[in-house]
Image (tube, rainbow, N blue to C red):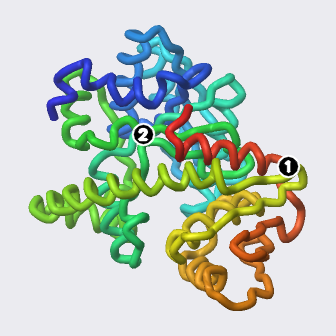
Amino acid sequence: MRQLEAPPADLAPFDTLCGAATGPIGIAVSGGGDSLALLHLANDWARDRGRQLAAFTFDHGLRPESRSEAQGVADACARLGVDHAILDWATPEGRQAPARRARHAALAEAIRARGGAMLLMGHTADDQAETFLMRARRGSTWYGLAAMQAQALSPVWPEGHGVRIGRPLLSARRADLRALLRARGVHWVDDPSNQNPAFERVRVRRLLDASPRLAARVRHCLEGVTQVRAIEDGLTGKWLRTRVRMDADGRIEADIAGLEPECVARRAGLLIQVAAGRDARPRWDKLQLIAHRLCADRAFAGATLGGSRIKRRGKTVVFTAEYESDPLAGKRLDALRNLLSGKP
């Protein structure tokens, strides 16, 4: 991969994502090849730019080896002169969803406690292709097929408030990152779960590894949907700035005049999250049903969805919390406006 051979190209994604970020730049490092490559490249960038890094390893405590692996990351960071902390999970359990949420919450709180607002993760082009196929199998829309974005808000709430996720390696191939580590004499840990076919991602990874032509077609499709999604996100950011307002009580009013139902469904999902203070949007099929009702030329008696109450006056849709209002809702809405408008 050319960019790993040419330092200026290596540093460009870090400049784009982190150049305007305040405080130290956080890095999630598990000890695997991708995250260790991220650590080394981020350290190259930080030394060149005079920036401070703060690396974190989340110890799930689900495998006997996890503590020694976390300590191995701490040792690797010490050799590079990078500040590092091991984050523990107080109530570990084996399911993936709670583990993912606990990890993101701990990472977000850790970087915010150090005065930072950007947390880097080592997702690669291979992860993108795998995510594309997994979402395609589940019937995702074109918007979801764009997979992971280079920049996103922390996926947990309220723990993640004020924190963005940055993915500077989305154009990098896994094999090239490992070649970089070998050239530097760096050893990494392979999580046994990455070889367990019980996990869908492992099966998809093996499929792509066995079919280079399929992998190339997936990457080509990803380029197209990613470009279209960038356009849609920009339009959504403008809409949030110009046609959505929130009052002091957390009541959100959104003008949907001229929008198609698919667009209303996607944008309403964001505002439901904000009003309700939830981690995730409601299911797409439920958002579609609400959107068609909101866009129809007939009476709308109101509805509840995803912890939010939804009403309509003409072409204005009103979102409020079904239960208790989120005191951070205004900050979350502003964060979405800035992210989708391309602002720091």
For this view, does 274 lie left or right of residue 235? right
Q: Nearer the viewer, residue 65 or 87?
A: 87
Taking the image as drawn, is residue 191 in sight? yes
Label 1 SS? loop
Q: Residue at x 61, y 81 (%)?
A: 295
Q: Residue at x 43, y 15 (%)?
A: 46
Label 2 SS? loop
Q: Amino acid at mark 2?
A: Arg
**In the displayed image of the protein, which residue is found farthest to the bottom?**
298
**In the displayed image of the protein, which residue is found farthest to the left?**
213
Q: Residue at x 42, y 14 (%)?
A: 80
Image quadrant assignment for residue 76 = top left
Residue for badge 2: 167
Position of residue 247 measured from the top left corner of the image (x, y, whole percent): 85, 52
> Could you tell me which quadrant the N terminus lies in?
top left
Position of residue 339 measured from the top left corner of the image (x, y, whole percent): 55, 42
Q: Is residue 151 above or below residue 131?
A: above
For this view, does 252 lie left or right of residue 226? right
Position of residue 125 measured from the top left corner of the image (x, y, whole percent): 28, 48
For this view, does 39 lie left or right of residue 217? right
Residue for badge 1: 327
